[in-house]
Amino acid sequence: MIDILMPRLSDTMQEGAIAAWHKQPGDAVAVGDLLVEIETDKATMEYEAYDAGVLRDILVAEGEVATIGTVIARLDDGNDDAPASASDAAAPAEADAAGAMGAPDAAAASADAQASEVASQVEPQGAVGQRLFATPLARRLAREHEIDLSAVLGSGPGGRIVRADIEDARARQASPEDTAIASPARCASSPTAGQGTGGATSTSTSASDARQPTAVPFDKTREVIARRLSESSSTVPHFFVTAAADVEALMALRAELNGSLESTGRPKISVNDLLVRACAIALREHPGVNASYSPEGRGETLLHGRVNIGIAVASPTGLVVPVIGDADLSPASHIARESRRLAGLAKERKLGPSEMAGGTFTISNLGMYGVEQFTAIINPPEGAILAVGAARPEPVAVNGAVEVRHRLRYTLSADHRIIDGALAAAFLATLTGLLERPMDIIA
C-alpha cells in the first residue's frame, strides 16, 4: 500500500484544497495518470500518479483542505505491508496531523459534506461573531457563479453549505419564488445572513457601523500575499533609491524592432521586456544586488550564480510572480515570448511550481496604469525589487535647449542587511546607462 501525500506545489504553499479527484476508489491507476487537481495559494494544479496500482481510499474529499504531507489517498500496489484500509489508519493522531479529514465516499456531494475543525476555522465571520459555514469548494463555486451564500440553505452537518447546495441554488436562479423562500430559511438558521464569500456582497457586516463595510474574506492567494508581504515589511530593513532615464532612444528602438517583427508573426517587444533585459545585464555587473540574506540568519549574503527575474503579474486571484530564468543570457525577443506565455498562464491560473520558483530579483511595473513613480515591498527571499513607472514626455534641457523627451522613473527597494546605498546607486547608474544606450541591451 502506498500513501499519497499532499505535495508541496509552490515555495509558499502550506496547505492545499482538493479541487477534483480524477480517479475514484477501485479505479486502476497507471504511472502518469492525472490523479487529482489541487488548489494552492497560487493556482489550481494537476497532480499525476508516480506509482501504478488501484486507488484504494480517498481520505481528503473534494473541497476539503489538508496541510502539506497529509495522507490524502492510498494506492494499492499489491504490497500488503501497509494497513488494509484507510479507516484502519485513521487514528486520532493522524486526523490531527491532517487537519481536515473526512470519511471517503464515492458521491461527490457527500464527500463535500465532510466537516472538520480546521475547515471551520477558515470560514468567514458573521456580524455577531458566528460563522457562515461552507466548504472551500462551495465558496469557490459560489464566487464563480455569483451566488450569495447568505441565500443558500446548507444541507451538510451543522448547516454547512456543500457543493450540492450551490448546484441547487444555480438551478433556482431562474425561479425568483424559490430564491425568496430560501433566504428566510438561512436568516432563521444563522444570524450571519448577508455575509459573502470572496466577492462583493450586498449587506454590511454590521448595521451599527457608520462606515457600512462589506467583508470580503481572503482566498488562499490573498492570505499568502498578506502574510509574506507583512513579514517582508516588518522584518526586512527596506531602503529606497530612485532614478530616471531619458528613454527617447529606447522608445525609438522599440518602434523599429516591432516594425520589423510585425510581418513575422512573432510577439512585439514591450518596454518591460527591454527593462527585464537591461536589469539582467546590470545585475550581472553588480552581483551584490542579485543576492539574498541567508535564510538561517547566520550573517551571510547569498550571491546567486543565475539571474532569474520575476515579473509581478496581476491575476484573477491576486499578484503572482512568474520567473524568467537566465534573463541575462536571453535576447529581448525570447524574453518577450516568455513574458507573454507566463502572463497568459497566470491569467488562467495554470502556472506551475517551476515557473514561479528560483527568482533572484523582481520587477513590478505599473506604467501601463499611468503611475509615474511608486515603491514596492521586497519579494522574499530576494534582496531587491524594482518599481517602474510610466515613460512620459517631459520638457528637458538638451545641449542648452529645451526639448520634449520621454523619461522613465524607477525606484529600487533594497534589503539594507546585504545591500548598501552606494551599491544600490551604482546598480541604478548602470541600469540608467543601459536604458539611455539601448543598443547595449540588444547587443
Image (spheres, rainbow, N blue to C red):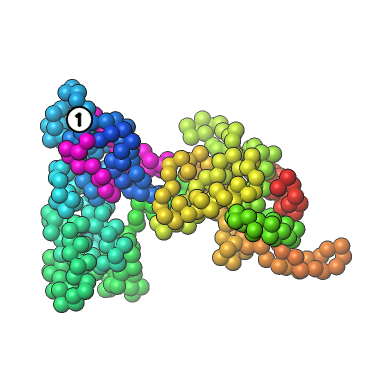
Q: Going by the picture, which residue comes out furthest to the front?
A: 263
| Magenta-drawn segment | 1-28
Placement of 251 over or under 330, stated as above or below: below
Nearest the viewer among 91 and 231 is 91
Q: Position of residue 209 (x, y in %)?
A: 31, 72
Residue name at image x 59 percent, y 36 percent: 306
Q: Is residue 162 magenta?
A: no
Q: Secondary structure at mark 1?
A: strand
| The N terminus sits in image quarter | top left
Using the rendered image of the protein, determine whether residue 421 is visible from the camera's viewpoint. no
Q: As drawn, is 278 to the left or to the right of 14?
A: right
Q: Position of residue 293 (x, y in %)?
A: 54, 37
Local crowd at mark 1 within 10 Å, few (<14), some, or many (≥20)? many
* Residue beneath disc 1: 76
Q: Position of residue 370 (x, y in %)?
A: 59, 66
Residue name at image x 28 percent, y 72 percent: 203
Residue name at image x 24 percent, y 57 percent: 138
Q: Is residue 4 magenta?
A: yes
Q: Going by the picture, which residue comes out furthest to the right?
A: 400
Placement of 207 over or under 125, stated as above or below: below
Location of residue 328 (image quadrant) = top right
Q: Position of residue 412 (x, y in %)?
A: 62, 50
| The C terminus sits in image quarter | top right
Q: Amino acid at mark 1?
A: Asp
Using the rendered image of the protein, determine whether residue 143 is visible from the camera's viewpoint. yes
Location of residue 244 (image quadrant) = bottom right
Residue name at image x 15 percent, y 70 percent: 182
Q: As drawn, is 362 to the left or to the right of 253?
A: left
Nearest the viewer among 153 and 217 is 153
User: How many badges with numbers are in the image?
Assistant: 1
